[in-house]
Image (cartoon, rainbow, N blue to C red):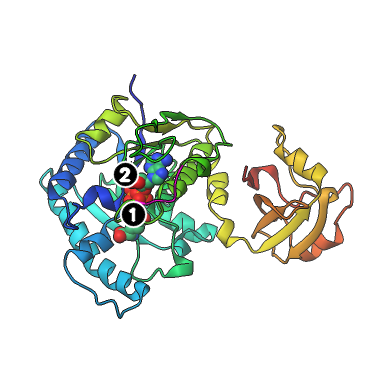
Amino acid sequence: MSFKYRRIVVKIGSNVLTQPNGLPDQHRIAQLVEQIVDIKKQGIEVILVSSGAVAAGRSLITVSDKYDAIAARQLLASIGQVKLINNYAQLFEKHNILCSQVLVTTEDFKGRQHYLNMKNCLEILLQHQVVPIVNENDVVSVTELMFTDNDELAGLIASMLNAQAMIILTNVDGIYTGNPNDKDSELIEEVGGAGVNFASFVTSGKSQFGRGGMITKSHMAQKTAKLGIAVHIANGTRENILIDVLNNKAAHTRFIPDKTASGKKKWLAHSEKSATGIVQINNGAKVALASNKATSLLPVGMVDVLADFKKGEIIKLIDEQENVIALGIAEYGADKAKESIGQKNQKPLVHYDYLYLLS
Ligand SMILES: Nc1ncnc2c1ncn2[C@@H]1O[C@H](COP(=O)(O)OP(=O)(O)O)[C@@H](O)[C@H]1O
Ligand SMILES: N[C@@H](CCC(=O)OP(=O)(O)O)C(=O)O
């Protein structure tokens, strides 16, 4: 059996692109480009999310310890991104394929209009047979503006573009039941549904040049699969890995996708950082929202408005224990919401179509 996808996001981690001595692994990068070209020839659209700017920068310049970590990262990424993208451009050119550079920050995903601008940009590149190569704009994104890592960015891009699958290439075969170097650890080949507690067996250890580690990768994979996108975590250091994953011939970890969520719900799923308002709901409302029925949030289930919001803004719904349980778009502003707290027969504050449950 092979997986039939029309559009995929491929994320390549720094370790896959870099040799242990810190220099770019030209041979491997060339082989990955060749596989992407083959996949494109099969009529599958590919968006590449590539890490490696900081690692490439490190191979070109030495930064003294006296500079703070953020400044050093800005310097390395600014120099390294040029090398990284040049490398890709030359390799794709050999196959008469154009690639493009798309550098983003978390700000580019906030606000529906900005989000749609970004989506249009990537769509027009794909319509012109270009391979977009996306990376975080590490030069300007500092601390609070940063993505957790490029796995988060890849999940956002896959959701934004309604991809059917996301392939995350790292330096191990997938998620193991323990430390991957431990002989008792086994590769988990399939993850279905929510509720797996990755923290119980995935250690916080990272590969030499990685940023997030396997825990954030697992959470992001689970979140993405919940939106209806299949996620494959596989070993990018193995020959022919992309083709083998698509033909289901490589041992790796696959997250089985849920039912496909709508575009609005996919956007909401990644919008927690853009939420303005906070509304507390009672237990009855929490149970009703979590049921399989398409339920909107009615004022009768509201307990309090803890942070103000305007009509059309994203709000967080929290339960009585103050856990965030959902994100939604407010049908009206905080003033009107406060007036209708606990009342029956009122217009829903969040319509089901604009509601995303976090668990
Ligand atoms: N249970 C586990 N299964 C697989 N990898 C794990 C596990 N626990 C920790 N890891 C570590 O996670 C690393 C991969 O994550 P990361 O460093 O973020 O890679 P990348 O640079 O590809 O994003 C592996 O090299 C491995 O050392
Ligand atoms: N944007 C950074 C990479 C950040 C990142 O998430 O790295 P990785 O964990 O190797 O995927 C860079 O290009 O160096």
Name the image quarter holding the N terminus: top left
Residue 106 drawn at (x, y percent): 46, 62
The label on residue 259 is: none
Quickly name the residue at label 2: 170
Mark 2 vs ligand 1: CB below 8 Å: yes
- The local secondary structure at tag 1 comes to loop
Q: Which residue is more in the foreground, 294 or 332?
A: 294
- Residue 335 is left or right of residue 244, and the answer is right
Q: Name the amino acid, label 1.
A: Gly
Residue at position x 53%, y 45% from top?
A: 266
At a point 31% along the width and 44% down the height, the residue shown is 170
- In primary-sequence order, the first of circles 2 and 1 is 2
Q: Is residue 72 left or right of residue 300?
A: left
Q: Is mark 1 within 8 Å of ligand 1?
A: yes
Residue extent of the magenta highlight: 202-206
Distance CA(mark 2)–CA(mark 1): 9 Å
Would residue 198 be found to the left or right of residue 61 on screen? Answer: right
CB atoms at circles 2 and 1 under 8 Å apart? yes
From the top left corner, tell me how far across and down residue 327 is, in percent. 64, 51
Q: Position of residue 344 (x, y in %)?
A: 89, 48
Residue 164 vs 13, above or below: the answer is: above
For residue 210, the mark is: 1
Which element is circle 2 on?
strand
Q: Amino acid at mark 2?
A: Thr
